[in-house]
Image (cartoon, rainbow, N blue to C red):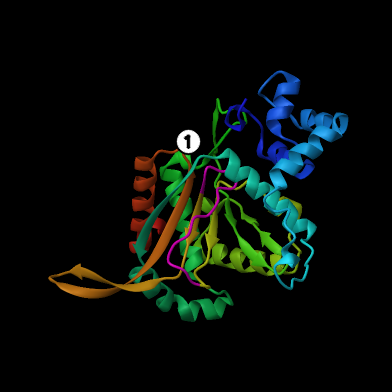
Amino acid sequence: MGQSEIIASPSVVALAGRLGVDLADVAQAAGRINIAREDVERHAGGDAQRGSAAASRDNRYWDVDHAAYGPVTHEPVSRFARAAAANLSAANRLIPQVTHHDRADMRAVEAFRRRLKPEAADRGVRLTALAFHVKALAVSLGEFPRFNASLTADGETLVLKQFCHIGIAVDTPHGLMVPVIRDVDRKGLWQIAGEISDLAGRASQRKIKPDEMGGASMSISNLGGIGGTAFTPIVNPPEVGILGITRTETVPVWENESWTPVPMVPLDLSYDHRVINGAEAARFMAHLAGLLANPRRMMR
């Protein structure tokens, strides 16, 4: 029985990884392919020797004496980072993921931000381009309901969400956190910008509350402040997509019979191919890019 035949939630897959248990062994012992947390725990506790053997098979590529090749130092991996690594590994193993790359003209957004700079100063709010990305994503999710959905663990039902919450990946000194802005579709730019700043600041200080995490319609991973031209963000289940953003770059665009320098932002949409197909992803990204090119459309 192969791993691809087994039905298990991401948390169960992550638990199996932490305990060094092979889900194929669990399924064979249980006599079924739908595996629950209790099955993994029972298998790990009832047959430690088999669990140890599975862990050995999984870890054989990492079990290397690196000091034999030269000087090394050791740095413990934090509990927070270990949990995140287990979840990412489970997600990557579970989801048939595809990434669609596109880019959007940011001239109108940047001009709009410049006009609003005095008002932003008066309000004490930092109006970043990310606020426009969050708003554009929320509007796009309203137009494309399958992107605002989750697949049940058995893969038989698509749960279409009647709310719009956007997760914002924040790089903190203690690891990646994804606090969530709730009901983005009912909020304006100023409120969105304020909440982005607040959540990012409190995430860095480890002051995010449990109810401010989880339940996102889709998440955004923004590397624009660091660099890069493209990347492949990993879908965070039970979401079916994640939007990656990298640094805006000036590129020549042919318009009005001449080349014009245009600030374009690279966009990377990773999506669960069980729910979304390539044509749907392309249409979604074209709509999203169109909103950024003409931000008045997202303010209606």
- Residue 45 shown in magenta: no
Q: Is residue 91 visible?
A: yes
Which amino acid type is shown beneath numbered disc 1? Answer: Val
Q: Residue at x 59, y 41 (%)?
A: 93
Q: Secondary structure at mark 1?
A: loop
User: Which quarter shows the N terminus?
Assistant: top right
Hey, which quadrant is residue 172 in on the image? Answer: bottom right
Q: Quadrant of residue 13?
A: top right
In the figure, is residue 112 to the left or right of 122?
A: left
Q: Position of residue 31 (x, y in %)?
A: 71, 18
Q: Camera-side residue: 70 or 61?
A: 70
Instruction: Say which quadrant the C terminus sits in.
Output: bottom left
Residue 238 seen by the camera: no
Q: Of 93 and 248, which appears nearest the observer?
A: 93
Percent coordinates x, y for residue 51 in the rendering: 80, 36
Q: Position of residue 42 (x, y in %)?
A: 83, 29
Where is 38 relative to 114, above or below?
above
Q: Give whichever of 5, 69 is nearer the camera.
A: 69
Decide whether residue 232 is among the magenta residues. Answer: yes
Characterize the magenta stretch by its predominant secondary structure: loop
Look at mark 1 in the image and give the residue it sits on: 275
Q: Please give the range of residues in magenta.
A: 227-241
**Which of 253 and 83 lies nearest the eye of the viewer?**
83
Given the current orientation, which residue lies at the most extreme left position? Answer: 257
In the displayed structure, would residue 117 be above or below residue 216?
A: below
